[in-house]
Amino acid sequence: MAEEFAAAAIGATALTVLLVSLIVLYARVLPSASWPRIISESLACAAPGVLAWLAFGPLLSATMRTVMMPSLALLGGICCYLVTLVARSAGASFTRSLVYSAIWAIGVFVPTTIHTFEPFASSQPFGLNPIDHGGALVMSVSVGASMLAVLVVERKSLIRGARMFVPVPVGMIALGVVVLSWLGWLVGAEFAIDGFVGVILVNGAVSAVAGAVGWVSVQLINHGVISLRSLAGGVVSGLIAVTAGAPLLTPVSAAVAGLIAGAVACAFTVRRGSPLGNQLRFLVNTHLMGGSIGIVALGVLATGSGFLFTGQTVIFQDQLLAVVATASSSFVVSSGCWWLLSKVGRAKRVVRERVLTE
């Protein structure tokens, strides 16, 4: 019991630090404002995820352990913060972003998290029991699909204007803290201090490095230039790719997953002449593609149970169908919700110069 609480405390602390470091790292996609305003609005957008889980999680889950609740509430805060980034970057008002965060938390985060961390409950849809150690289905696939939904709805209305400036040293520190806190969450997500801790840390670090290598390699081949953003994109892609299976992969498998995630995310993200578009596609592609690749890769690479070890495709099919079902439902709910909210607020919107014409 003491080990469970220790692991849960590590996870909760890591998620708290991760939220703050992501706010700093991702601030560059938001319209320019004072740092106190950016931080306060970001924390406010995260709050519905925490509150929704604390209110509905214990009621709707059948076998979820009490020790898991604080960490999953904080995970909800991170997801709600992330899911509002594209909307806020598009110029949506703080009120509309906050309402969207609250609806998304109840309609998408809570049910997806229950299906992820209570995989064998009778409420599991379609009979799927996906493997997902760190919540990649909700943290990456659901979030990425919902970001894509907002981007599709707002594509012709994205505003051009000054973005938040994040100094390189601050960005480097934030990226380092993101890596460390993400690894801390993967350790805490075990909800036990056991022999898998070392495996999780090694696989997380290897996948992050491999993700950076994959991203940088593709960008050098296609564009001949890289930057700090290239490193950040690759590292985050690698971390996302290993989230679902950190204790279930070998270092070689983790490197393969991270390398593919970084390379694919870069190929679909970086384009010439579209700085803001690249930033927004970065948010969508690193989360949606990185998470999807990591989850599906478990069906092939999971030690002792993946296709390479057993020759069976059952797990691969479950992983793939879980990604498709999660992404589709999140996209439909989010696009419908944001479309209605955008219609309500359209009359009050300030018309500005468009961006993202390609």
Image (tube, rainbow, N blue to C red):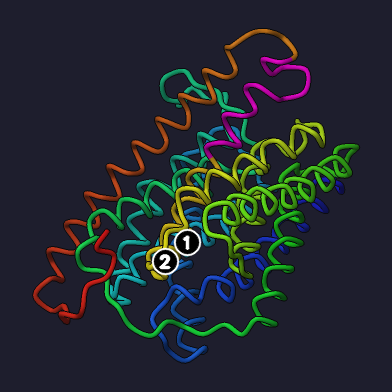
Residues shaded magenta: 292-308
Establish if 356 lies above or below 91. Answer: above
Q: Where is mark 2, residue-wise?
A: 85
Please report contact status of discs 2 and 1: CB closer than 8 Å, yes or no. yes
Task: Give the x, y percent position of residue 93.
Answer: 28, 76
Establish if 27 lies above or below 202. Answer: below
Magenta-drawn stretch contains 298: yes
Task: Give the x, y percent position of residue 97.
Answer: 32, 69
Which quarter of the rendering shows the N terminus?
A: top right
> Could you say which disc has been placed on residue 82 in the image?
1
Establish if 297 lies above or below 184. Answer: above
Q: Tell me the chief SS of the magenta region.
A: helix
Q: Amino acid at mark 2?
A: Leu
Q: Amino acid at mark 1?
A: Leu
Helix, strand or loop under label 1: helix
Q: Is residue 346 visible?
A: yes
